[in-house]
Image (tube, grey):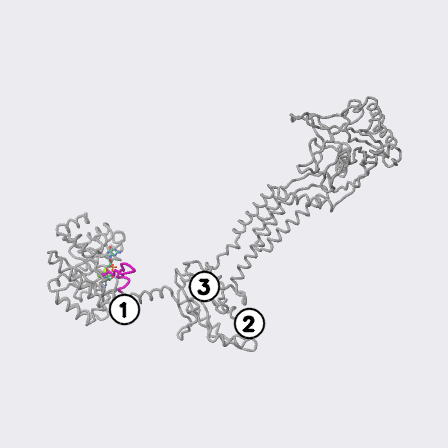
Amino acid sequence: MFSGLASPKWTKSLHRRLVLATAAAMIILLSSLLNMGAGLEDVWKDGRDAIQERSATGDVVVVEIDAASMAAFKRWPWPRSLYGRLLDRLAEAHPAMVAFDIDFSAPSTHAEDMAFARAIDAFPGTVLLPTFRQAAGNLTDDFVESLPIEPLRQSAFLASVNVHPDADGIMRDYSYGTRTAGVPRPSMAALLAGTTGKIEQGFHIDQSIDPATIPRISFASIVDGSADLSHLAGKRLFVGATAIELGDRYAVPRNGVLPGVVIQAQAAETLLLGRAFPDLGRSPATMIALAAVFGAAFLKRRRNRLILLAGTIMALHVALLASEMMGVATFQVIPATLGLAAAFAIIVLIGLNETIFDKERTDAASGLRNGVALTEELVPDGQYRIVAINFRDFAEITAMLSGRERESLWAQLIERLKIGSGAGEIFVYRGDNYVWALPADDPMDELGEQLEGLGAVVANPMTVGAHAIRLKPHFGISQGAGSDGADLLARAIGAASKPSSERIWTLDDIELARGVRERHALIGEFPAALGDDQFWVAYQPQLHLAKGQIASAEALVRWRHPTRGELSPGLFIPIFEEEGLIQSLTLRVFEMVIADLARWRKEGKTLRVAVNVSGTLLTNEMFNRALHSRLDQAADVLHALTLEVTETATLTDPERAIAALEAYRAYGLEISIDDYGTGQSTLSYLRSFPASEIKIDQSFVKHVATSKNDQLLVRSTIGLAHELGFVVVAEGIEDAECLAAISEMGCDIVQGWHIGKPVPAAEFESEYLTSAGEAATHSDRLTA
Ligand code: C2E
Ligand code: MG
Ligand code: MG
């Protein structure tokens, strides 16, 4: 159909959506790279932990050195025998393990140390003692491992209790073990839980495990025998400081500040509950988000794009929650979420914009697109027509209808127009002007016929409520390249409002209008131009091949227009001929040529000049008389004048034309038939004219060197013309090859740009008339 209207709107094209998807992908990658929204990530992680909060197994029991214990034993550090007493008491309860989160790397007194060592040795279960990794000194990066003193580690297992808060000071991770100076050491929690993992490999302490559900029992209450130890059988005990004054406390994500021993117990519970799952980082969500934005680009409907993006966000979060609940893995979702949300916002904003854009281009009443949309879609300089429809007495007809009936009328009308217009789309301009565009290269008469048919269809009565409405349509058509859509639209509507009785359509052709304007301007300016001597004569040399000389010239009129510059006769001669202005112009040309000829003659330069005379003038008595009177006064140049007439000019009234030409011959003028070959007459017919010369039209001459057809035609014309006694002139010699071909065919005289262009009299004189000798040299140069 009509390509200008079928082209997709860029705002809705796949290409556009892919560009936007790429932009969104950049946002996603950037936010992932910069770990944007890390704070939000933490908050959401806490939220998820809160949602799935769980209790500890109860297998790990913290034996806390609490405020009460500190109060009971008064001094700190405690004598080591106290820990021995603890073990002795616990032995009766049969716990599986007792782990100490207390530094025993420095000796106290020998008696105290040995008392504790003996108790460890006597304890029936496993005793775990801590090792610490610490910097070897201020000036070194090396680490050393501080072990419990020799006597204590005899019967105990050793485990590291190093913990590493994150950069923000919050403790999130725990490791399966550490390696210090090449010695691997399991972590206390790993050993306590009986789990093995890779040394130096970390896991997140599961903050969904509520630390308050880890059972605690006061150190002092065990030693003083007040505690009930019956439930400790098989349990894993973790002895450590919880008293605030001992300072072993760390900030954790969800639960504020916790004692180190509780955190380690929570780490052990994490392992016991199988919740030390891997952290996949930001990549999985980032990849999924990227896939989603590019996937969305391939969805045509905006709504579906939004659903996909929002759905992806939801799915990511649900998947994360589910995966954490099942203890499979965790990953970060906030950067991807932010990126997806940005993409979502972009689409919504653009959608809003497009809605406004579409609103501005839609007719509210009919829902059809309006004139703004139409003019925007018409490519400048595109080849199209605009057709508009208008109805006579429209206001009167619709005045008697209700709002609803009017709508029904529009709907029926639009339906008929859609079917009958042959256009892809009907547009509405200012409420009640229906317009459409069609390609301009379809023949005008076909369009006329089509509009006749459509007019009949539209004029068929339409039933609206109780009324039968008969519309009287008239179409306006506008066309013309180079004008913008708005101009075309206005012209079509203007034309539609000018009903004519002859036809159902009115054409507003911009080129035609432009031509008419120009025509009127030229006609109006003519008298002044004649008075101001704006017309002048250019002479184009003609080379006589036998003589090798420029022996004649054609006089060609020029208009030196004050504002438009040099105008060619092709522009104004036809207009002047039709408007009857050619007469005075031709007489003026004769006057100028006669004056030039007389001057050259005085200077001893002989030359023949051909003057063009429009055919209409030959039968114009007034003109003939006026020219005769000028010829009467130019007796000495009459034999140097040729009168050029076109063959078509002689056909309308041959008798009178021939009589007029005879009269000019009687004056001594030669007659030449111009543009021979473009008309219908044969050479033998032209024989009855008093002409002595024929000028073969340039259209046959131009390609004579290359076209076999033209060669045949020109050669036979020259031959026949010669037989009939004509001198033969060839016009339009543009190059040496053409000149050579024409010369070889025996042509008498040649004229064309290759010989010389039309030039002012003075230039012609100095260039071609200095002496006969130079003219000969000139021709030698040409024929060489
Ligand atoms: P024409 O009488 O056939 O004049 C020949 C035209 O061909 C001239 O155009 C000339 O400039 C052009 N021409 C010459 N050599 C070549 C060439 O090698 N190649 C091409 N392509 N063209 C060449 P111009 O001057 O524009 O005149 C156009 C027409 O206007 C003339 O055709 C003639 O019919 C008319 N005309 C010119 N002067 C007058 C005049 O004073 N009175 C009247 N009634 N008509 C005139
Ligand atoms: Mg001519
Ligand atoms: Mg000609």
User: How busy is the neighbourhood of tag 2: few (under 14 within 10 Å), some, or many (20 plus)?
Assistant: some
Rendered image: mark on residue 218? none
Image coordinates of residue 657 in percent, x first then y, are 19, 69
Image coordinates of residue 395 in percent, x first then y, are 49, 75
Tell me where residue 486 sits by quadrant. Answer: bottom left
Ligand 1: which quarter? bottom left
Name the residue carrying label 1: 578
* Amino acid at the residue labelled 2: Ser
Check contact, mark 1 vs mark 2: CB within 8 A: no
In magenta stretch: residue 568: yes
- Of labels 1 and 3, earlier in sequence is 3
* Amino acid at the residue labelled 1: Glu
Q: Is residue 666 visible?
A: no
- CA–CA distance in space, label 1 to label 2: 53 Å
- CA–CA distance in space, label 1 to label 3: 35 Å
Helix, strand, or loop for circle 1?
Answer: helix
- CA–CA distance in space, label 3 to label 2: 24 Å
Tell me where residue 727 sits by quadrant. Answer: bottom left
Image coordinates of residue 586 in percent, x first then y, are 21, 65
Side of 688 relative to 396 (left or right): left
In magenta stretch: residue 538: no
Check contact, mark 3 vs mark 2: CB within 8 A: no
Rendered image: mark on residue 437? 3
Tell me which segment is drawn in magenta. 557-573
In front here: 435 or 456? 435
Q: Is residue 503 visible?
A: yes
Side of 228 relative to 308 (left or right): right
Name the residue carrying label 2: 408
Helix, strand, or loop for circle 3?
Answer: strand
Beta carbon at label 2 within 8 Å of ligand 1: no
